[in-house]
Image (spheres, rainbow, N blue to C red):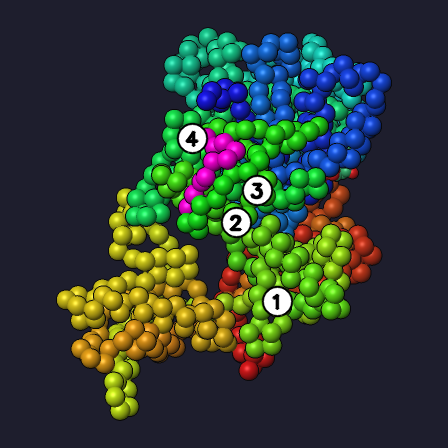
């Protein structure tokens, strides 16, 4: 069946920002202006804008929906129906402990608008999010917001983008006035000044550039054009000979540069004061990619591991990725998915390639600003939600039953902190289990386990705040009262050396005996080869997981192949138990290189035990160490408290990495072990009369100093 909208006019994008930079305000304006494009009469007929927003909220569709669909015709072609674009705006959470959600959404969005606070410029989370976008090759346009605020500076913020994020950023606009005097912006391509008039600034008015900005505009336009023509040799040569490309040609080339991640155009304005958001939406149309501009989706055939590529076309078999589960107050559980190829209809039976189970597609909806639109089918490149899907979890692939494919997995971080949780009453007990399993379905970095020894429920997440928020949600959304224990750090273990070990597991107790004999070699796991061919070659020779690899070098059947998986299993289980202080071991490469078997006595269990013991022997001699999670901490403080803050960081085994200024405030960044940080935000507040604030996020695991490792070891015993 034909698609209802041409794919080249679809934009799947997200708005990404540090908390408080203005993502919510920008999204609200986006919904308002896009709603206006087909409801302009209605709104002008009396209802105030705030009413309109209030109603949106009452309808239960908020800007926090996982994906919202809306339509936008660029301001320069308002009445041209053929220029109308469909936006699927994918929510990316702003909170630091949920950065993994940002990482996950990067997988399904094709482009991003990165919002910055015009006073603070680049903030720590902007850096993290930028890195995720970089990893996922997501094209970006930057929006320096809040230029109306006291202390705002476009140039300073722009420079912080260049210094801290990318030299490929370039001004597409410059502001007309800042702080109280902020009125609009100059677009350096059209060389017009833009102002926003009427209610909510709905009327975008282009005027001549004010005299005092003409020189700057010329200068920065020159820089911009040079960068743009670099995208094309002919344009470059023509430009060097004095011929500037036409406006349309410049836009086309800039689009090419943005899609290739070679240029990040920087726009500016004030969402709150209704200045500039429409031009950001124009930039989404003009410069961010449609699904057709992107390479085919990569996946593997779950049956044989063969690589498969699926272009965004309805002619291909159906393949989609579930990226978010959300409960809608009116229709219930929604599973949001992105279709990469083919199409799916209500009533179709599809395969969940990750679980191997089949499931029927029920109602399909698309959330719009003012309604839930029920649709019958979803096409390649589009985003929608299925109601009441039972099985599908975040990150799983749905596909045609006769063309199985598992799309590249979304890799989630492992939780770094855990705590005991206990219901306050018997009634809470029943609700707790249900609520926790729901919350962990929605958020793959939040895990729930049972301590096998004490039978207590343990919750784990990405930071203290992450778990605090979960406990708060338990109370508010699920009405469950629970008390929690002290947070525990998720330590890990690894080895720093190489060692070999031989183990013979032989038992002769009457009847049938046991015989398993293995020789293994352990070493620290190395990163995969950069080169794609090399990497594929390597992966054919090993059995590799995220933090473990197993190499089978048994020749001539000295151990029959049916026993090899048992050896691997023994090793894997021993790894989970650790050998330093009982924490899981990571990043170890294990090679099974020799051994022997017995015709009668050998069994899977004997080989499993032998593998496990050989592994423990070997790792004990391979310089085992304890790893502790390190957090990236950024403290923003008045200068007067610099000394105290620095002192508090060094007393926590922290390492200050940089000190800088942000407006009047001082900014300290440091790496600090998580175990030292419990309660730090509270301590910091009392130490600085509430004037300093910290953002804390997971950075990496590093080897714990030996005295600390000893303490942890004895605490575990
Ligand atoms: P989010 O946390 O990124 O979603 O940020 P919000 O949109 O909630 O904005 C955080 C605060 O900044 C709110 O108090 C907003 O009213 C305010 N804000 C957002 N945009 C602007 C702006 O352009 N100018 C000013 N002065 N304040 C803004």
Q: Which residue is mark 2?
A: 391
Task: Tell me residue 35's x, y (percent).
Answer: 70, 22
Q: Which residue is mark 3?
A: 335
Task: Tell me the element at label 3.
Answer: strand
Task: Measure the C-alpha gap from mark 1 to mark 2.
Answer: 24 Å
Foreground: disc 2 or disc 3: 2
Residue 590 appears left or right of 328? left
Quadrant containing ligand 1: top right
The residue at the point 33 percent across, 67 percent down is: 568
Report if the beta carbon of the residue with label 3 is closer than 8 angstroms to ligand 1.
no
Q: Residues within 10 Å of mark 3 (few under 14, many from 20)?
A: many
Which quadrant would residue 117 be assigned to in this image? top right
Task: Tell me the element at label 1.
Answer: strand
Q: Which residues are magenta?
A: 342-354
Q: Earlier in the sequence, mark 2 or mark 3?
A: 3
Please tell me which residue lies in front, 564 or 110: 564
Report if the beta carbon of the residue with label 2 is closer than 8 angstroms to ligand 1.
no
Q: Earlier in the sequence, mark 1 or mark 2?
A: 2
Q: Which residue is mark 1?
A: 458
Task: Measure the C-alpha gap from mark 3 to mark 1.
Answer: 26 Å
Which quadrant would residue 652 be assigned to in this image? bottom right
Task: Tell me the element at label 2.
Answer: loop
Which quadrant would residue 710 be assigned to in this image? bottom right
Task: Measure the C-alpha gap from mark 2 to mark 3.
Answer: 10 Å
């Amino acid at each position: 069946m034909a698609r209802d909208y041409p794919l080249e006019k679809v934009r799947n994008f997200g708005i990404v920002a540090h908390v408080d930079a203005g993502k919510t305000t920008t999204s609200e304006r986006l919904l308002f202006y896009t709603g206006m494009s087909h409801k302009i009469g209605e709104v002008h007929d009396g209802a105030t804008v705030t009413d309109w927003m209030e109603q949106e909220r009452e309808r239960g569709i908020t800007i926090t929906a996982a994906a919202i669909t809306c339509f936008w015709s660029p301001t320069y072609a308002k009445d041209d129906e053929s220029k109308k674009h469909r936006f699927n705006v994918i929510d990316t959470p702003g909170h630091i402990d949920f950065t993994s959600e940002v990482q996950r959404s990067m997988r399904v969005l094709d482009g991003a608008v990165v919002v910055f606070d015009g006073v603070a410029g680049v903030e720590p989370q902007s850096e993290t999010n930028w890195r995720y976008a970089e990893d996922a090759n997501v094209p970006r346009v930057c929006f320096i917001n809040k230029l109306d605020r006291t202390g705002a500076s476009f140039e300073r913020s722009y420079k912080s983008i260049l210094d801290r994020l990318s030299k490929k950023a370039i001004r597409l606009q410059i502001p007309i006035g800042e702080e109280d005097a902020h009125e609009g912006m100059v677009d350096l391509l059209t060389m017009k000044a833009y102002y926003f008039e009427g209610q909510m600034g709905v009327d975008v008015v282009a005027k001549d550039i004010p005299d005092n900005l003409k020189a700057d505009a010329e200068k920065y336009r020159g820089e911009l054009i040079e960068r743009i023509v670099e995208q094309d040799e002919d344009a470059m040569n023509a430009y060097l000979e004095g011929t500037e490309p036409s406006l349309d040609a410049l836009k086309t080339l800039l689009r090419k540069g943005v899609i290739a991640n070679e240029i990040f155009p920087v726009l500016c304005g004030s969402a709150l004061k209704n200045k500039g958001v429409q031009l950001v939406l124009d930039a989404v149309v003009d410069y961010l990619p449609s699904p057709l501009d992107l390479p085919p989706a990569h996946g593997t055939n779950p049956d044989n591991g063969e690589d498969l590529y699926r272009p965004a076309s309805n002619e291909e078999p159906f393949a989609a990725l579930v990226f978010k589960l959300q409960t809608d107050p009116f229709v219930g559980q929604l599973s949001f998915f992105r279709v990469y190829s083919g199409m799916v209809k209500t009533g179709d039976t599809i395969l969940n390639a990750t679980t191997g189970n089949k499931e029927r597609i029920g109602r399909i909806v698309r959330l719009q600003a003012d309604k839930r639109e029920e649709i019958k089918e979803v096409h390649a490149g589009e985003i929608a939600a299925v109601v009441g899907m039972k099985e599908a979890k975040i990150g799983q692939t749905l596909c045609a039953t006769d063309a199985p494919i598992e799309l590249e997995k979304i890799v989630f971080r492992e939780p770094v902190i855990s705590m005991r949780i206990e219901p306050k009453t018997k009634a809470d007990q029943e609700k707790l289990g249900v609520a926790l399993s729901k919350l962990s379905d929605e958020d793959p970095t939040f895990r729930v386990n049972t301590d096998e020894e004490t039978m207590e429920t343990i919750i784990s997440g990405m930071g203290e705040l992450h778990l605090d928020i979960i406990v708060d949600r338990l109370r508010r959304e699920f009405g469950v009262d629970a008390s929690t224990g002290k947070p525990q750090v998720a330590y890990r273990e690894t080895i720093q050396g190489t060692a070999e070990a031989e183990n013979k597991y032989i038992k002769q107790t009457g009847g049938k005996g046991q015989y398993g004999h293995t020789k293994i070699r352990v070493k620290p796991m190395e990163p995969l080869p950069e080169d794609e061919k090399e990497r594929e070659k390597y992966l054919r020779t090993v059995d590799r997981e995220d933090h473990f690899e197993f190499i089978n070098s048994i020749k001539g059947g000295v151990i029959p192949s049916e026993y090899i998986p048992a050896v691997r299993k023994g090793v894997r289980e021993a790894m989970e138990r650790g050998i330093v202080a009982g924490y899981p071991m990571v990043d170890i490469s294990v090679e099974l290189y020799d051994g022997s078997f017995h015709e009668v006595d050998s069994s899977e269990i004997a080989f499993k035990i032998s593998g496990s013991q050989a592994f423990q022997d070997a790792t004990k001699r391979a310089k085992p160490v304890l790893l502790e999670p390190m957090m990236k901490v950024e403290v923003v403080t008045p200068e007067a408290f610099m000394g105290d803050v620095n002192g508090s960081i060094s007393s926590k085994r922290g390492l200050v990495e940089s000190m800088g200024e942000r407006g009047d405030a001082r900014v300290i960044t440091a790496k600090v072990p998580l175990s030292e940080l419990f309660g730090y935000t509270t301590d910091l507040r009392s130490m600085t009369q509430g004037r300093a604030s910290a953002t804390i996020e997971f950075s990496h695991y590093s080897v714990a100093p030996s005295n600390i490792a000893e303490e942890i070891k004895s605490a575990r015993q």
